[in-house]
Amino acid sequence: MSKIALITDTTSDLTDAIIEKYNINVLPFRIIYKDREYKDKIEITPEEVYGNLEKEVPTSSMPALEDMENLFESLEEQGYTHAIAVVLSSGLSGIYNGLKVVSENHPGITTYIFDSKSISAGEGAIIEECGKLVEQGKSFEEIVEAIPSIRKRVHLFFVVGTLDYLKKGGRIGKVSGTIGELLNIKPIVSVDINDGKYYTHEKVRGRKQSLNKIVELVKNILDKKKCKFYALHGHALEDSKMAFDELSKHPNVTKAVFEGYISPVSGVHSGPGLVGLVLFEEE
């Protein structure tokens, strides 16, 4: 009889309750300072990363190959026959390729690795849905077949306080940079489902207008679809809570989750001021 393990990484921003409910294995990214290194969400918190940004902006790295190896060895010991992994977009990280290499060292577990082409709750919603399918008794093959259509139900938007951190981290993608900053352009950013990189969904001038616009974009989708709604932030609690409070009252919101801080890894690259809103369409 098959036994299916679920795997994701810390940038999926899953709540502890969801991780526990569906027994999801979470690989930690690494936050790297000049003189030390931390495991994302295990050895360092988002608050600590943001609090230290003025002194030092760390870099980040995908989960250690050793951590991946240890996970697969543990899964084998627990009798798992199959594994489904949903990971951070390959346009933003090398985790997809790294996990693929490690999984090939463990042929005893049939593994499917899905490139979410997303981040944060957009990535998390996909693996959460996989958890529900496992709970329903769906087979490995049935879940693998369903995942691409699950991905199409994700809508993710965010705004940042400044584009400086995306530029420094090399994550700027197709988002307009220097000229936009001079004109006080605050783009609404999303992730391209084709290449998994950031792109400008809308251009808005000024912080207030950008927040109004991101709420409007989410409302337009909710007017047509019933959705789960997630709100997250990067050192922008007040702005994200205002957006959450307004949107969670929409009649087509089936469930509203205020997830709080994004992972420290995401925070390193977005900087302070991020407000992220994610919808997951109900079938």
Image: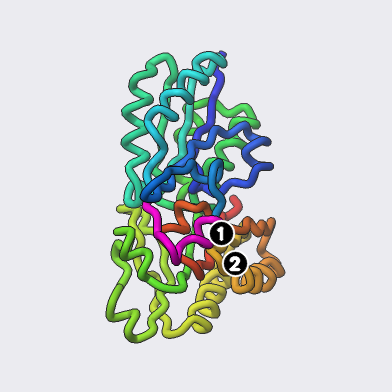
Q: Find numbered disc 1 in the image and state the secondary structure of the residue it sits on.
A: strand
In the rendered structure, which segment of residues is drawn in magenta? Answer: 47-59
* Residue that label 1 marks: 279
Q: What amino acid type is highlighted by mark number 1?
A: Leu
* Residue that label 2 marks: 222
Is residue 146 something one can see in this rendering? Answer: no
- Given residues 48 and 178, the one toward you in this image is 48
Q: Residue at x 48, y 36 (%)?
A: 27
Q: Is residue 246 above or below residue 16?
A: below
Q: Which quarter of the rendered picture does the N terminus lie within?
A: top right
- Given residues 251 and 46, the one toward you in this image is 46
115 within the magenta span:
no
Is residue 2 something one can see in this rendering? Answer: yes
53 within the magenta span:
yes
Residue occupying the far front of the picture: 35
Q: Circle 1: is it few (<14), some (14-19), or many (20+) Cα within 10 Å? A: many
Q: Residue at x 59, y 34 (%)?
A: 133
